[in-house]
Amino acid sequence: MITTDTSTLTVSSTSPNTPTAATAHWGGVFAMTLCVFSLIASEFMPVSLLTPLAAELGVSEGVAGQGITISAIFAVLTSLTISRLAANLDRKHVLLGLTLAMAVSGALVALAPNFTFYLIGRALIGVVIGGFWSLSAATAMRLVPKHQVPRALAIFNGGNALASVIAAPLGSYLGVHVGWRGAFLCLVPIALAAFAWQAVSLPPLPPLPPLPPLPALPALPASPTAPTAPKSVTVFSALRRRPVALGMAASGVFFAGQFMLFTYIRPFLEVVTNVGDDTLSIALLTLGAAGLVGTSLVGGFISRALYRTIAVIPVLMAVIALALIPWGASLVPVLVLLALWGLLSTAAPVGWWSWLARAMPRDAEVGGGLMVAVIQLSIGIGSMAGGVLFDGFGYAATFSVAAGVLLVGAALTLLTARASRA
């Protein structure tokens, strides 16, 4: 899941070649928000349907969890290449194509005759994830006037937050009443509605012309104090900055540890806590609702102590992961621990996007693309490693390793803070 903290966003940090609209196209903003809702629900729906999905496709829960790994891998590849591949295409057409691909993905997953076709559908949603999130912020800046861009991005995040709250419990509920295939099939009409709404509400978004070259300047005598011309920043040159490299590593390790545990929360609840279908939906709703609260509260902590906040969160999540092992068979403690997990895990991405705004204020586009790639790659690695551990050694080993990974993330965050101060 990718969230953006709009409280720290400044439009001046975007590319000067990204003009804002003279008039607001709020219909387009809300259409893209519906697309965000459908996208987030599609991305994490397998978490709430892992057990029945695995049983029908004839694989273990750990193998079924690799569907999230596959989508993350393709999201990384797409986020790093779409700006080049779509350089000469109207962004409206690209977004419409991605939205249509999301509907196709939902249909492929719902109708998959075997695990291979299921993975193909998940790979397709990964392409949509990487492409859409790489283009969404720049598109918002072209839909509304400059002073309304933060509001447009906040609306996008509203769809993100809503999906984060209801996607998992709704998936579990639908899985009981219409089956896991029916739950995925329910996402198809939502994606098609987003496609139709964007088709009528988005204005043409042709590719932006390249910036004109600067006029030649007369040669000046060399001066040891003369400033050098700024160089264009790429992903690789950004990673040569020690604070940026450490920060990306810290955030990546955090997301790997989070999804090493979170991806397999349903089989844990069913097998260890022994919950029924209705209680499972309540547990997932509790986790999501707590996440919404965490997102709304974390801003004050970030503004006062950014590094302390993003360092303490993984430590507390590691404690929760370890506490779930001895308390896993008791329903009430598990519900409390999951609520705390949701409160912290959903707040953490807001902190990391706030860090990015401070670490790369003049290179927001490069930094944003890099962050998307790091997050998705880490989700894939965490889900894959968690699946191997869950199948081979059980939930206790999975949760213990996840806690260790989260603690490593906290340590890297402290190193990031030290490097930034230096």
Image: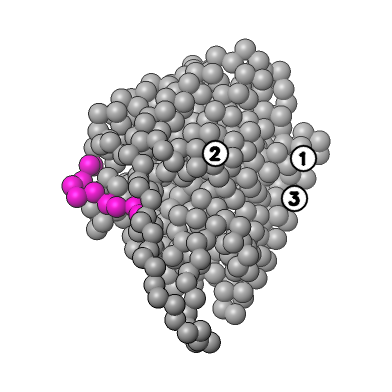
Q: Against 292, is 173 above or below?
A: above
Q: Position of residue 291 (x, y in %)?
A: 47, 49
Residue 54 tag number: none
Mark 3: which amino acid?
Val
In this picture, residue 220 sits left or right of residue 31: right
**Badge 3 density bin: few <14, some 14–19, many ≥20, Cα 10 Å:** many
Residue 389 tag number: 1
Q: Position of residue 308 (x, y in %)?
A: 55, 70
Mark in the foreground, 2 or 3: 2
Query: How many marks overall?
Result: 3
Residue at image mark 2: 78
Circles 3 and 1: CB distance less than 8 Å? yes
Q: Which residues are magenta?
A: 17-26
In this picture, residue 253 sits left or right of residue 226: right
Circles 2 and 3: CB distance less than 8 Å? no
Mark in the foreground, 1 or 2: 2
Residue 401 tag number: 3
**Badge 1 density bin: few <14, some 14–19, many ≥20, Cα 10 Å:** some
Q: Earlier in the sequence, mark 3 or mark 1?
A: 1
Q: Position of residue 215 (x, y in %)?
A: 36, 65
Helix, strand or loop at label 3? It is helix
